[in-house]
Image (spheres, rainbow, N blue to C red):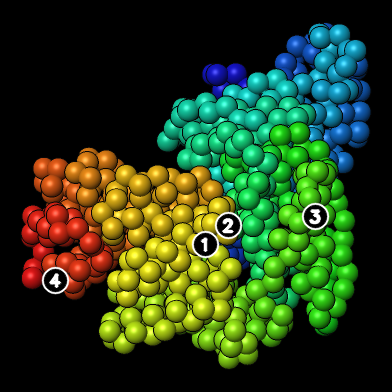
Amino acid sequence: MPSAEEPASRFEAVQHRSAPVSPDRPRRRRSLLGTDRKPAARIERRLVAVLATDVAGYSRLMNADEEGTLARLKQCRRAVVDPKIAEHRGRIVKTTGDGMLVEFISAVEAVRCAVEIQRGIANGNIGVPEGKRLELRIGIHVGDIIIDDNDIFGDGVNIASRLEGIAEPGGICISDDAHRQIRGKTKIAYDDMGYQSLKNIPEPIRAWRARAVANACPPMDADVPTLALPDQPSIAVLPFTNMSGDPEQEYFADGMVEDIITALSRMTWLFVIARNSSFTYKGKAVNIKQVGRELGVRYVLEGSVRKVANRVRITGQLIDAPTGAHLWADHFDGCLDDIFELQDEVTRNVIGAISPRLEQVEIERAKRKPTENLAAHDYFLRGMANIYQVTRQANLEALQNFQSAIGTDENFAAAYGMCAYCYVWCKANGWASDREGQAGEAERLARAAARFGANDPVALAHAGYALAYVVGELEDGGALIERALMLNANFAAAWRFSGWVNIFLGEPDLAIDHLHRAMRLSPLDPLIFIVQTGIGLAHFFAGRYEEALSWAQRASRHSPGYVTAAILTAVSSAVAGRDAEARKAVARLHQIDPTAAASKFANMFPLRRPADLAAFDAGLRLIGLPE
């Protein structure tokens, strides 16, 4: 262990050590390759995870028993350290007596390796007298390094070795850079050590103490509160892994999960997390206990889809999130012609595992299919994959895919509803060049969705909001949304739409209740900034301008380019008398939309109450936008 008086760590010392120069011999300037006669090679750099480790109290152990300590150290490396490094694809760069420097291709592999090493050594210390135990200290950092002759140099090495020096015996200390990459991906608990001043490192480094506890869950994200379990059974369906080897089939795997979520959501006794929150875990290594806590659910369903030619295999497993126990697992094979039957079988088994007392009639209600026409459904899934990208081009592609679905199946209610919803995005983002023409088309599509989908909550909710927001038919639109919620009380998007429509109707407190319900059903929704903006707007019309400003700022932090949140931030600041914040918000608004003018935003909401129109117009005048 380096002492506080040492000028550098052992690895820093190796990097800076040079041979003595005889005073009788002229100095020669040498290149990195060791000679001034050859041109210097390009310096190789790469970003890696660096692990530095040493034995705590090594000098004391050697003084007490040199041969025994050395034998135990060699055995420890043979039995635990070296195999774990190889298993996690690490490369031992150098050893220094009791110390070791290792590089990994990722922080996740480095930390997993460190956890397993510390766990293995702790198990090996069982029954060993305390004075003879080997305990390692490990430091991990992710940084840019220089590679030369199979050795590595640079701050990435120096910071890792200094973090090792402040780690506890048997502990792991990681940098903030490493922590950001591994959060939520390893079974380890973290303690924030704050900013640490490390010797020979110019800037303080934020460090985290990692505790290798066998059953520990990763910490909750600081921005995501732990949610209490609802009174009713609750479930989240995570994105299924696409095992087809074809990135183009992502939409198919995602669509399968959406179908299962929709089917489960029709169970009125079941609390189901919305698709948008579940899909924040897409492509990530997850800890099921953490997922359960972050989403506030008891059960988590995960699985995979493998689609080859006309055959498909769906695998799934249901996990009790608080305990991590596997309640059910199965796989289903079949032809694409039977894809809906496969979905129904998965859904029936999941529901049966959660509640053995479930009556058959409730199972049957989970079987509803959006269409029997596979080609139309395929277009629909592609459109749903587009709609969540929230760009003008993706919205156009979504519209085209939904139109193709309707062209294939003219009775496809959900496709009509999603077509109408594409025009909601056009208006909300200022993409509408022909507002009257788009309003007419949105109304036609919404009416068709309602006609063909009287019992389809997806069709009804999206059609209803298009009628209310784009067309201005608040009562008709609100009635469709209410019908959707009667059919599926767990439909987060319908609660969001209901909240906004109640804002337009002049019912701000009811709107806030409904928007909070939407946020609870989908707490990690990528579109949560729309909910936050709605809550802020409802507070604004209720005369609570400070609350309005707080929610608008929260929405802007989540989505800095969302023009509605920017406008609300500006007018709320102005009405609340916060002139400096209002000026900043207006400047931000002009960055988002250089053509921003009062006339452009005066009628952005179909407000029913004259007092609400007057309040918003007054706010627009206060911020001084050009007419």
Type of residue at label 2? Asn
Specify the label residue 360 is tagged with: 3
- Of tags 1 and 3, the one toward the viewer is 3
Could you tell me how far apart the alpha carbons at marks 2 and 4 are, in whole angstroms?
39 Å
Residue 571: percent from left, percent from top: 17, 53
Could you tell me how far apart the alpha carbons at marks 2 and 3 are, in whole angstroms?
18 Å
Type of residue at label 4? Ser
Could you tell me how far apart the alpha carbons at marks 2 and 1 are, in whole angstroms?
6 Å
Quadrant the N terminus occupies: top right
Q: Nearer the viewer, residue 128 or 546?
A: 546
The residue located at (26%, 45%) in the rendering is 539
Quadrant the C terminus occupies: bottom left
The residue located at (55%, 71%) in the rendering is 454
Specify the label residue 488 is tagged with: 2
| Residue 166 in view (yes/no) | yes
Residue 603: percent from left, percent from top: 20, 68
- Please say if the residues under marks 1 and 4 sit with CB atoms less than 8 Å apart: no
- Please say if the residues under marks 3 and 4 sit with CB atoms less than 8 Å apart: no
- Of tags 2 and 4, the one toward the viewer is 2
Type of residue at label 1? Ala
The residue located at (22%, 41%) in the rendering is 544
Residue ID for mark 4? 599
